[in-house]
Image: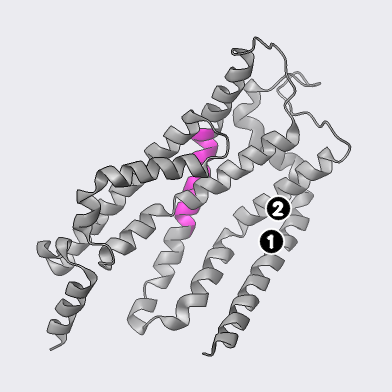
């Protein structure tokens, strides 16, 4: 296809994604009070007491309530539309793949969606309570402040960024798997340079987490480290089963030579 046709195809797919997210935001906006209650459930014990005797957020501006609700609707719409977003992204590259390579598309999309929602669930179940517990302790213990205002826009923004950040960060093992299995980066390189990889994962964890909390960063680092090692273990098993133990050292060129020799 000419470059303009590629750009037209990209625009069409981006338009589908944008319309889906905006339409989802409008629909989800109605249910935002319930969603906000669900989002803050893991951190309620750390919030100042509200009118109902439970931990509650505080709206400090006239537009604060609308802004917080729209932010929730927009980001939750991105999470809900994640399968569509991932599919449109993959479908854009689909024509460039061979018939054999296209067989991997559906399993890849399924794995990306599953990993995304595992990341979101992990953040909700494990990260939120630990992160906000540490952050709020810096106020109550560090400054001796017994009471404080929990600004709704600030708290909700951090919660949603953490959720989406973990969802996308959990795509890492899929990337490592394909780089290794396709010999773009030899398995041996990943294994021999593990120190650099670990430092890179630590830096990635620091960048992706928006709350500047060492607790959140270390928890994400631990999760990414486990996923990285799992991806390498699966890659090793497949490489040995498919091409033999020697293939663990192959570059892309050596792998292509091996395939050509089989064809001959």
- Binning the other alpha carbons within 10 Å of mark 2 as few (below 14), some (14 to 19) or many (20 upward) gives many
Identified at 51% across, 49% down, the residue is 167
| Magenta residues (range) | 113-127
In this view of the protein, which residue sits in the foreground, 51 or 261?
261
In this view of the protein, which residue sits in the foreground, 239 or 28?
239
Seen in the picture, residue 62 relative to 73 is either above or below; the reply is above
Image position of 130 (left or right of 203): right
- Give coordinates of residue 215: x percent, y percent: 47, 29
Secondary structure mostly seen in magenta is: helix
Question: Which label was assigned to residue 74?
Answer: 2
Identified at 20% across, 68% down, the residue is 251
Q: Are marks 2 and 1 in contact (CB under 8 Å)?
A: yes
**Where does label 1 land, which residue?**
21
Image position of 179 (left or right of 213): left
**Could you tell me which quadrant the C terminus lies in?**
bottom left
Asked if residue 117 lies in the magenta stretch, the reply is: yes
Between the residue at mark 2 and the residue at mark 1, the CA separation in whole angstroms equals 7 Å
Callout 1: helix, strand or loop?
Answer: helix
Image position of 168 (left or right of 241): right
Identified at 16% across, 86% down, the residue is 263
Question: Which label was assigned to residue 118?
Answer: none
Asked if residue 49 lies in the magenta stretch, the reply is: no
- Give coordinates of residue 86: x percent, y percent: 53, 64
């Amino acid at each position: 296809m000419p470059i303009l046709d590629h750009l037209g195809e990209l625009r069409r797919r981006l338009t589908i994604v944008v319309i889906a997210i905006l339409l989802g935001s409008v629909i989800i906006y109605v249910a935002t009070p319930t969603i906000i209650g669900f989002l803050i459930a893991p951190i309620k014990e750390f919030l100042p007491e509200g009118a109902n005797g439970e931990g509650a957020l505080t709206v400090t501006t006239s537009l604060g309530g609308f802004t917080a609700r729209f932010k929730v609707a927009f980001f939750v719409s991105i999470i809900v539309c994640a399968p569509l977003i991932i599919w449109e992204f993959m479908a854009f590259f689909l024509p460039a793949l061979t018939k054999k390579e296209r067989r991997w598309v559906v399993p890849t999309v399924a794995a990306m969606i599953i990993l995304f929602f595992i990341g979101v669930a992990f953040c909700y179940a494990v990260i939120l309570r630990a992160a906000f517990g540490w952050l709020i302790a810096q106020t109550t213990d560090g400054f001796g402040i017994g009471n404080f205002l929990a600004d709704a826009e600030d708290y909700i923004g951090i919660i949603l960024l953490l959720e989406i950040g973990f969802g996308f960060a959990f795509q890492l093992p899929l990337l490592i798997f394909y780089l290794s299995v396709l010999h773009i980066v030899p398995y041996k390189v990943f294994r021999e340079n593990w120190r650099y990889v670990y430092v890179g994962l630590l830096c990635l964890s620091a960048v992706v987490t928006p709350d500047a909390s060492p607790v959140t960063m270390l928890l994400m680092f631990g999760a990414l480290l486990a996923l990285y090692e799992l991806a390498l273990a699966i890659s090793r098993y497949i490489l040995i089963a498919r091409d033999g133990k020697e293939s663990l050292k192959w570059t892309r060129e050596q792998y292509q030579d091996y395939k050509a020799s089989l064809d001959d």
